[in-house]
Each structure stands twice: as C-alpha cells, then as structure tokens.
Amino acid sequence: MAIKLLLHDTPTLSGDELSRTLTGDSSLRGQKLTRFAGYVTIMDRLLHAFGYFTFGTKLDVAEEVRSKEEVLTKRKNMIGSKCQIFYQDDPFMVSKASMQYLYDEAGKQYLDCVSNVQHVGHCHPQVVEAISKQLSTSTCNVRFVSQKLTDCAEELLKTLPGLDTVLFCNSGSEANDLALRLARDYTGHTDAIVIDHAYHGHVTTTMQMSPYKFDHGSSLPQPEWVHVAPCPDVYRGEYRLSDEDLNNPEKLKEAGVHYSDAVKNLIEKAESNGRTVAAYFAEALQSCGGQVIPPAGYFADVAKHVRSHGGVVVIDEVQTGFGRVGKKFWAHQLYDDGFCPDIVTMGKPMGNGFPVSAVVTTKKIADALGGKVGYFNTYGGNPVACAAVLSVMKVVRDEKLLDHSQEMGEAFEKELNQLKKKYKCIGDVRGVGLFWGIDIVKDRATREPDQKLALALILKLRRERGILLNADGPHTNILKIKPPLCFNKQNLADTINALDRTLAELSQ
C-alpha cells in the first residue's frame, strides 16, 4: 500500500520502503528522504500517535468505506450471535461521533441521550489529546513504575474520603469480580447479597451475582452463595408508596427502613443455614434495573446490618460515578448522611470510552488480597488509561460539569413532570442530575408496565426525530436518559419536544 506524506512535493514510499526507512536502511534514507530532510529528523520518530507526526502532519491512509449492509453481513458471519446491539431490527451504524452527537453511515446527525460511557462527550478533544500524547510516550506494563498511576490514584482518592487504596482493572466486570475477592479474603466469609434486578458485569462471578441476567435466561443460574434482597424501588418494588407519597420524606424514610431490614433478615436467614456473608453489593443507583433511586438512609442502615455480621459493603459506581448525579462526584454521596462504603468499584465513564476501571478501598482490606499471591493486571492502570482518567477528571473540574449536571437535572425534573401531567402513559419520572428514567405504563392505577409502547417510542424517536434513547428495566418499559455531560439546555428542549410529539402520536 502506498502511503503519501502530506508535505509539499514529497516522495511516495511503499510499505516495505517505509519499514526499511524506520529501521535505518541508509540507502533508502538517502534516496527517499532527501527532499524533506530539512523538515524533520527521520520525521521525528515518524509517528506521534494515531497517525499524526509531532509537527502536525498526518498519514493520508484512505480507509475503505463499506456499506451498512456489507458490515452487517460480515458481523452476522464472523461475530458471535449473542453479541448484542442496539435497535436489533434496524441497527445503528456509527460513522463518527462528536460530543453529544452521533452520525450514521449517511452522515445524519443524532442527539445521543444514552452514552454514559462517553462521559464528557464523544471524542472530547482534551481527552483525545491526553491519550494521544501518552500513547506516543509510554505504554509500559504496569509492573514498571509510572507517575501516571500514582497521579491517577491520588486524584481519585481526593473524591472518596475514608478510603485510601486503589487497584486498577480494565472494566466494571473485572472491578466487581476483584471486589468480591477482596471481600472474601478480608472477611473469611463466602457469600454475597445483591439486590433484585442488579447487574454487576459479564464475567462468570458477576453474572452469577446479577439477577438482571440469571432471572432472564442466563446459562449461569443463581448459585447458593448469592442471596437476593428486594430492590429499594418505592414505585414498583416490594414496598410501594402511593403516587402522593413518592416525594414525602417521612414515607421515603419508612420505605428505606423496610428495605434495609429485609437485608438484615436475609443475612440472619443465611447464617441460620450455615452460610457466612462476605459482602453486600449494590449499584449506587440501579440503572439496568430501571433507573431506581434508593431512599435516603437506606445504604447507611444496610451498612450497619452488614458490618455487624462481619461483612463489607461494596457500592458499584460503574454507571453512576464521576459527577453524573450533579451535586456530588459519586452517587452514594447524595444524601450527606455520612455513609462510606468499604469498597467502591468504578468503570465506564472513567476513561470516556478508553477501557479502564478501578476498585477503591482501605489499605487493611487491600492488604488481605490473595494470601501470598500478589495482584497483577497487565493493562489495569497502564499509563494511557491513567492519562485518560486524569483528563476526564480535569474536564469535569474545568468545565464545572457537576454544577452543569445539577442544573440540567433540575430542568429535566421540571420538564419531564410536565409531560407526566399531559400523558397518562407516564406512570413515574425519577432521577437526578443527568440520570433519568420514564416509567411507561398501560394504567397508572395498576402501574402495569407497557413494554410495547416504550419500544415503539424509542424506535420512532430515532427514525423520525433523530433522538437516541434506550428502554430497560425488568419489564423493558423504562426510557433511560443518561447522556454525555455536555448535554445542554437546547438539547433538553429538543428532547422534550421530540418526546411530546412522539407521545402524542403513539399514546392516542
């Protein structure tokens, strides 16, 4: 393949010639590089990162563009059939992305209301630059000492008072699996308590800890060491509040006590059967389970029960951390009640799309890991991943995204509740910051979920309004809104207008 350097009047080098030039073939260097030797010294090691030279030129490598039909055919033939994609009946093919927008293969722009992974925006220039710079500097194995690793750990710990030790991984699934190992090694116990509809990852142990999976046809059934507590959902959970009481602080507190007592009872039942509980696992705000906001005081009460029986509390912030909830950096800090988990796991938004995750805990718990065997993760905490995390955290600070998320959350609450007053198919609106759920129902009195309408809404919003949403929850009737944090007031107005028009057309 010919590769042409984007400099005036430069020669064309074949792939073989380019390779020989890089390895120091003096004959080729003299023949081929004379014309632009004054511009660079062997092109300043040639590549900076991602095809860029340090002085700003770029490799002109034309990428072959295939049709959506061809790509889908190849995917069907070569990618595992169980690998899920959005919009199964009409998959969305992304040609490019920028901040809160995605573009399909035809170049049409869509407003992305679902990509919580691209936390500060798709391809945010500061994050791209940080990754590119580090990628061209060092990508060493993590058993070499790296300043980026300790800088990253230091910044994370500033946000989590009460915790002092970080272990890095590559995904939320890995982080939750490691958290279970930590809990077991530290307590000497074996079992885990999770809440109904929870999702903690796709590796074997986390699949076994996820009712979201094992209650819906997973080949990995619920094992005897996993105990399921009721989800603290005050709208359609085991202990429900009336519509009038959903925002009543006293009633919410009562509900929280009911749900935390259920955890205590579950521990006592497990112990009566000869089991020992190592950890209680919960998402700070349940996402896949239906955008559930636990009542104030719930986690603090659960922690007392779990710790009194020798277990630890693990809070999964993989989907909710890094300022999404607005006034706090972490969702478990929302209520200012002094609650501090023993272990916090994090991932998805952490690298803005670059694979990275972490487990944050105390030195005492971390030092119990593995007995005489140390912890090593080839890519966990590599310099490039840490550069991504540091950049994300800097953008969150510099662009004041916590304040922005808080402001947007207040606007969302107002606008979504206006839609609720207008359309009887909206049973509940719940959320905080840039994390919202719209519960679509057939009947408000019975709260019967309407999966058919929810799915019709997201398809019509995409095809006719250019708005990307998703439906989830145990009944797949919750419209999930969790966009990149750069989502702005005009985006909100466009989303509300699109929802209004689409609800009017479909809910008649």
Image (spheres, grey):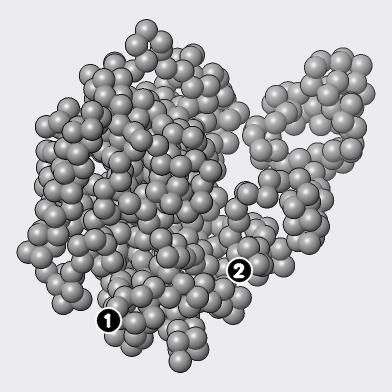
Q: Residue at x 44, y 62 (%)?
A: 472
Q: Residues within 10 Å of mark 1 (few under 14, many from 20)?
A: few
**Residue identified by numbered label 2:** 109
Say what secondary structure mark 1 lies in.
Answer: loop
Vertically, is 385 above or below 146? below
Q: Residue at x 51, y 51 (%)?
A: 217
Say what secondary structure mark 2 lies in.
Answer: strand
Residue 136 falls left or right of residue 245: right
Q: CA distance from mark 1 to mark 2?
A: 39 Å
Q: Indicate the quadrant where residue 426 lies.
A: bottom left
**Residue identified by numbered label 1:** 445
Q: Indicate the quadrant where residue 402 lies.
A: bottom left
Q: Amino acid at mark 2?
A: Gln
Furthest toward the left, the residue is 250
Vertically, is 45 above or below 50? above
Q: Earlier in the sequence, mark 1 or mark 2?
A: 2
Q: Nearer the viewer, residue 80 or 16?
A: 80
Tell me the quarter of the image containing the C terminus: bottom left
Tell me the quarter of the image containing the N terminus: top right
Is residue 415 visible in this depiction of the protein?
no
Q: Nearer the viewer, residue 376 or 231?
A: 231
Q: Residue at x 60, y 28 (%)?
A: 136
Residue 191 falls left or right of residue 58: left
Q: Indicate the quadrant where residue 326 lies.
A: bottom left
Q: Position of residue 264 (x, y in %)?
A: 15, 42
Furthest toward the top, the residue is 372
Q: Residues within 10 Å of mark 2 (few under 14, many from 20)?
A: some
Furthest toward the bottom, the residue is 508
